[in-house]
Image (cartoon, grey):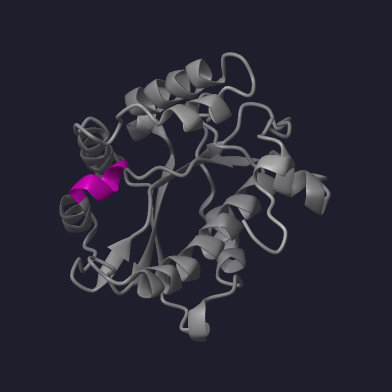
Amino acid sequence: MTLDLSSDELLSTTRAVRHRLDLTRPVPRQLLEECVDLAVQAPTGRNRQRWHFVIVTDEERRAALAEVWRAGVATPGVSDPVPTRDVRRANVVPGVMERVFSGATHLYEHLHEVPALVIPCVEGRTDDAPVVRQAGTWGSILPAVWSFMLAARARGLGTCWTTGNLVHEKEAARILGIPYGEVMQAALIPVAYTLGTGFRPARRVPREEVLHWDAW
């Protein structure tokens, strides 16, 4: 059963969910498979369809993957303070950064309890690749992942884009049997039912600060 959301509501209320992930309720395999079915309808560069989704529900592997993710998040330089301009933008709403850090801490402490961890991957690596190749590769996996997250939201599931596993990507690949030399991990997406389904659009910087007509 899907939520009664218009397209605009779905697009504007699919949030990064951390505190409100239900850690006690398993996510049916069928729902996750439905989300993947929709994800692979996304556009992809040259129609190569190089995407893969590794879904981890096994308790021991979730725990091992969570440890790798925590080690990545705790690595110096990964969680350094964001630039001043980014802080100003994040603080469009008073207290928003406090909520962000609180949510990140909550996820750090409970990631291993999240019922499903989804690792989207793409065939081919972009290590030291020119920007045009990077753009083509990431542009082939990111639309699919966003479609997965939208499909999850429509089904009452919460998600959050995280990348702590990429700091120690080889170790994460070893745990999951991913051929590191041929396949690149893009993220680690916690997936769980949400505690309540009511989410609101976020306050963002004004359109005037991000929209450019004809030139910068």
Q: Is residue 17 left or right of residue 73?
A: right
Q: Position of residue 55 (x, y in %)?
A: 40, 55
Rendered image quadrant of residue 214: bottom right
Residue 23 in view of the camera: no
Q: Is residue 82 above or below residue 188?
A: above
Task: Tell me what residue is drawn at x 28 percent, y 46 percent.
Answer: 165
Image quadrant occupied by the C terminus? bottom right
- Residue 99 falls inside the magenta stretch: no
Task: Tell me what residue is drawn at x 42 percent, y 35 percent.
Answer: 114
Q: Position of residue 39 (x, y in %)?
A: 57, 64
Q: Position of residue 185 (x, y in %)?
A: 32, 59
Task: Tell me what residue is drawn at x 47 percent, y 79 percent.
Answer: 49
Q: Position of residue 81 (x, y in %)?
A: 35, 26
- State the extent of the magenta-drawn residues as a range: 164-168
Q: Is residue 200 left or right of residue 188?
A: right
Q: Nearer the viewer, residue 41 or 211?
A: 211
Q: Nearer the viewer, residue 35 or 57?
A: 35
Residue 39 in view of the camera: yes
Count of number-bearing discs: 0
Q: Nearer the viewer, residue 45 or 159?
A: 45
Q: Is residue 92 left or right of residue 72?
A: right
Give the dominant element type of the magenta stretch: helix, strand or loop. helix
Task: Tell me what residue is drawn at x 28 percent, y 37 percent.
Answer: 66
Q: Is residue 129 above or below residue 91?
A: below
Rendered image quadrant of residue 177: bottom left
